[in-house]
Amino acid sequence: MPRGTPLCVYTYTHTHTHTRTHAHTHTRTNTHTHTHARTHVRKNARTRAHTYTRTHARKNARTHIYGELTFPFDPQVG
């Protein structure tokens, strides 16, 4: 029965987008900024460094995830 052949090919493209969601782990590289705040000041760096790394990870994390999400979306249309 040739009716089940075209259905199998359709589900294949869906699994491709799942592998790209792994880009979330890339945001872990932002922890590098922690070492920078320690060399600056030891007393004030403890409270100020904590809030600084939080805003930084949000800006970089958005561009990283967004750029990877637009990639699999293009080939799906064609």
Image: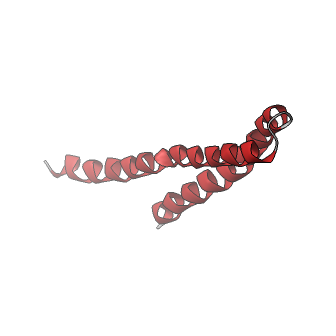
Outermost residue toward the bottom? 78
On the picture, is 49 further left or further right than 61?
A: right
Q: Position of residue 67 (x, y in %)?
A: 60, 59
Q: Position of residue 60 (x, y in %)?
A: 69, 52
User: What residue is drawn where x is 79% and y is 37%?
Assistant: 42
- Say whether residue 10 is visible: yes
* 21 w.r.t. 72: above or below: above
User: What residue is drawn where x is 53% and y is 58%?
Assistant: 73
User: What residue is drawn where x is 28% and y is 53%?
Assistant: 9
- Say whether residue 58 is visible: no
On the picture, is 56 further left or further right than 73?
A: right
Q: Position of residue 19 (x, y in %)?
A: 41, 48
On the picture, is 13 further left or further right than 74?
A: left
User: Which residue is at the front of the view, 44 or 68?
Assistant: 44
On the picture, is 67 further left or further right than 15?
A: right
* 71 w.r.t. 2: above or below: below
User: What residue is drawn where x is 68% and y is 43%?
Assistant: 34
Q: Position of residue 29 (x, y in %)?
A: 58, 49
Chosen colour scheme: secondary structure
User: In the picture, residue 48 is in which quadrant?
Assistant: top right
Report the label total: 0
